[in-house]
Amino acid sequence: MFPVVTAVVVLALATGVGIAAAALISDTDTSGSLNAGLLGVSPVHNGDTVAMSGTVMVPPSGAAEFCPHPADAVADVVDTRCDDAVPLTGLHSDELTGSTTVDNVRIGRTYIEGTWHDGTVTVRTQGSPKPVAPGRAADSRPPCPAPKSGWQATDPGWQPPSALVDFVNSRPQQFAGLGIAYPSWESGSSDGPTGAAEVVVVGVVGDQSAARTELSAIYSGNLCLTTALYSAAELDEASAAIQPHVGQWGILSATIAGWQPGMEMIDLEVVVVNDHVWDLVKQAGSDMVNVQPVIRKISAN
């Protein structure tokens, strides 16, 4: 996912970007590429089979708990707090991965499949930690094809001009956001985006030709226009409906995701999708919300 520019930045334009804008602008249409936020997610009810993977804590009493978001370790000190704990029955604590004991509490990681009942999970299957669901693939390459002249090199430390950032941010009904893409970025690279060219990507709601005229008058460098499913204003409105409930109903966080074509949405992290979360997401606009349950239903009762 490429960086998002949300603040005003003051800079000098990179040498040589001031050539004909038409040669550097490329368009693409990513509409329809977004999966609904509730796709593959549904409310968990008693008797459903759920899956989770992460930290488990077992005190001397043996009352094991799954920790949806364990406190971060600081200076190699492991914290035994377990906020939003989910009680477990039938756990084999001797099969935890990376197990350690702190203040008589055994702490380790494991993958679990089990049966949900009134907030408690009865463990049916246990194994090595692994992802419960695939994440969104990060890709920092521009969604537009390169213009005939190719993308122009930018200097190290280059940033988009403040006038362009201001223009996009001041029109939340027209644009979804502005980000930076890297044509030479390699998918799966652990080194992050690399290469001499950087491309400004703008998500446009509505008429791209009008936006192209407006933006090219401000910026003559590498520019990619892509069709956005939702405007920044729509995302802000949906976020405003959700934010008051963060901390309730097992909602851990709600953030407007780093903007990327076809992925303009709110990332909603929850312990589990219960009926309250389900109704809230539908009210806010399910296609705009990427629901990320820590505990995911894999089959119904």
Image (cartoon, rainbow, N blue to C red):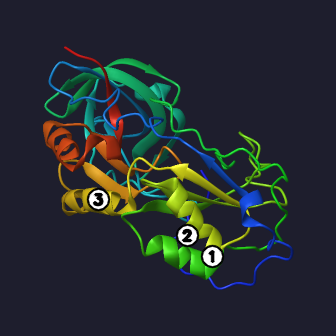
Q: Could you say where residue 152 lies in the image, as x and y percent from the top left?
A: 83, 61
For label 2, the residue is 214
* Disc nearer the start of the sequence (2/3): 2
In this rendered view, identify the residue nearer to me: 84 or 166.
Answer: 166
Residue 300 lies left or right of residue 1; in this view the side is left
Mark nearest the camera among 2 and 3 is 2
> In this view of the protein, which residue sits in the foreground, 253 or 142?
142
Q: Amino acid at mark 3?
A: Ser
Lower sequence index among marks 3 and 1: 1
Q: Residue type at mark 1: give it.
A: Ile
**Would you say the residues marked 2 and 1 are in contact, meaning their CB atoms lie under 8 Å apart?**
yes
Query: Residue 211, image x and y in percent?
Result: 52, 62
In screen coordinates, is 63 left or right of 263? left
* Res. 8 in view: yes
The reply to whether the C-beta atoms of the residues labelled 3 and 1 are less than 8 Å apart is no
Relative image position of residue 51 (x, y in whole percent):
36, 26
Task: Find disc 1 in the rendering and name its residue.
Answer: 218
Q: Amino acid at mark 2?
A: Glu
Q: Is 130 drawn above or below residue 146 in the view shown?
A: above
Spatial distance from mark 3 to mark 1, Cα to Cα? 30 Å
x and y percent of residue 162 in the render? 60, 81
Q: Nearer the viewer, residue 257 or 261?
A: 261
Residue located at (24% from left, 63% from top): 240
- Neighbours of disc 1 within 10 Å: few (<14), some (14-19), many (20+): some
Would you call the spot at circle 3 few (<14 residues within 10 Å), some (14-19), or many (20 or more)? many
SS label for mark 2: helix
Residue in the foreground of this view, choosing between 146 and 183: 146
Element class at badge 1: helix
Q: Is residue 36 above or below residue 232?
A: above
Q: Secondary structure at mark 3?
A: helix
